[in-house]
Amino acid sequence: KQEVTQIPAALSVPEGENLVLNCSFTDSAIYNLQWFRQDPGKGLTSLLLIQSSQREQTSGRLNASLDKSSGRSTLYIAASQPGDSATYLCAVRPNNNNDMRFGAGTRLTVKP
Amino acid sequence: NAGVTQTPKFQVLKTGQSMTLQCAQDMNHNSMYWYRQDPGMGLRLIYYSASEGTTDKGEVPNGYNVSRLNKREFSLRLESAAPSQTSVYFCASSTFMNTEAFFGQGTRLTVV
């Protein structure tokens, strides 16, 4: 059974810092990995989708990398802003299973 | 473009009552999903519908039923609500099972 872990559970940084959020998974046989953002009391907003054949994806100040062999993905946020404060979730879709597995998330606070 | 719309946004039920959560998407997606989100546990798949006319169980299907009414709509029914079903429920959709998923804003359900 695929297990997805996100460390740390919470992170607080001053505005302007570059930061990295981590996501690890136990089974490297994945089809893709997706990063989401969730604001309090809201739904999930898709940030980036990385296919298993890709190493990274970029969108604006966000860059997500994928290392299937080591079972790891990172989400890099450049020049963080208070508006980036949210919970960030990663989800892995296994090759032969329709169940997208989620990590518990990292709650990010960016202080002005 | 509304995306994925869930109704209601909030609901309080008494133990043993029944209710149906509604979900509709306007992106012409083939696949739809129901997840529940509980503190510290991430999102877990309840049921999914890979395409119109099909439904399958996810990780935590007990106590729930679903109906894929048409390509746009996928409902989740609680026949006899229990306090353990207190959670936030999210509906999601994607073009196919292995493509980018988009989420609704969630339904916060409390069973007393």
Image: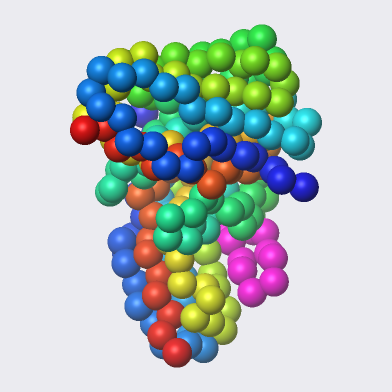
The answer to whether any part of residue A83 appears in the image is yes
Q: Is residue B50 left or right of residue B77?
A: right
Residue A106, how many percent across, how many down?
Answer: 38, 61
Residue B56, how many percent across, how many down?
Answer: 51, 14
Specify the quadrant that holds the N terminus of chain A: top left
Above or below residue B106? Residue B32 is above
Q: Provide the residue span drawn in magenta.
A: A56-65
Residue A101 location, quadrant: top left
Residue B1, how many percent across, how many down?
Answer: 77, 47
Looking at the picture, the colour scheme in use is rainbow
Please, what is the dominant secondary structure of the magenta stretch?
A: strand
Who is closer to the viewer here, A69 or B68? Answer: B68
Who is closer to the viewer here, B112 or A102? Answer: B112
Specify the quadrant that holds the C terminus of chain A: bottom left
Residue B52, how many percent across, how many down?
Answer: 69, 15
Q: Is residue B83 left or right of residue A19?
A: left
Residue drawn at 70 percent across, 17 percent down: B70
Residue drawn at 54 percent across, 47 percent down: B105
Q: Is residue B101 left or right of residue A97?
A: right
The answer to whether any part of residue B95 appears in the image is no
Residue drawn at 54 percent across, 36 percent down: B7
Residue drawn at 65 percent across, 15 percent down: B69
Above or below residue B57? Residue A105 is below
Does the magenta portion include B95? no
Does the magenta portion include A62? yes
Q: Tell me how many marks there are.
A: 0
